[in-house]
Image (cartoon, rainbow, N blue to C red):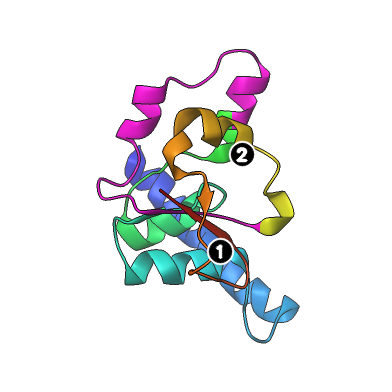
Amino acid sequence: QHAAVSGAAIIIALSLGSASAKWSARRDTTLVEAYSVVSADLGRWYFPFDPLAHLLAEGKFRPNIDVIHSYATSRVPVDESAFRSALPENLRYIAVPPSVSEWGVGELSRLIPEYMHRDPQLRYAKHFVFSR
């Protein structure tokens, strides 16, 4: 089952990659930036809005903020220990696109409040970075 999902994700990513060339000659999407960062520093980053970056770079499923937010909105919030168990073991940074920095961040603050300090040292074009 995981192999089928992984295969589908790769097919989608490849098709998005060729489609993104039409949208941007530089291919500067949030997914491309997230993938580049995760690939360069495995196990230390969490991109809650870009779970495909983790799947492609690490081969691991990470919590998707859409799911977390949907559960919270339905008054069935995600369990903190279950959430933390799915994060990278050596987590140092969380990156969120500025355009959606208000959406879902409340749940991140509840689940991992120690990581909600904006890190002014790390700057990326498509993401705000938070750390301890």
Q: Is residue 32 above or below residue 128?
A: below
- What range is drawn magenta here? 69-97
Dot 2 crowding, Cα within 10 Å, few <14, some 14–19, many 20+: some
Q: Residue at x 59, y 22 (%)?
A: 71
Q: Is residue 29 left or right of residue 36?
A: right
| CA distance separating discs 1 and 2 | 18 Å
Q: Amino acid at mark 1?
A: Leu
Is residue 91 visible in the rendered image? The answer is yes
Q: Is residue 3 left or right of residue 89?
A: right
The residue closer to the viewer here, 8 or 74, is 74
Picture coordinates of residue 115, whole percent (x, y): 45, 44
Disc nearer the start of the sequence (1/2): 1
**Is residue 94 inside the magenta stretch?**
yes
The residue closer to the viewer here, 108 or 70, is 108
Q: Is residue 78 above or below residue 36?
A: above
Which mark, by number, is residue 101? none
Q: Quadrant of the N terminus?
A: top left
Which residue carries the number 1 mark? 31
Q: Amino acid at mark 2?
A: Val
Q: Is residue 78 above or below residue 17?
A: above
Which residue carries the number 2 mark? 105
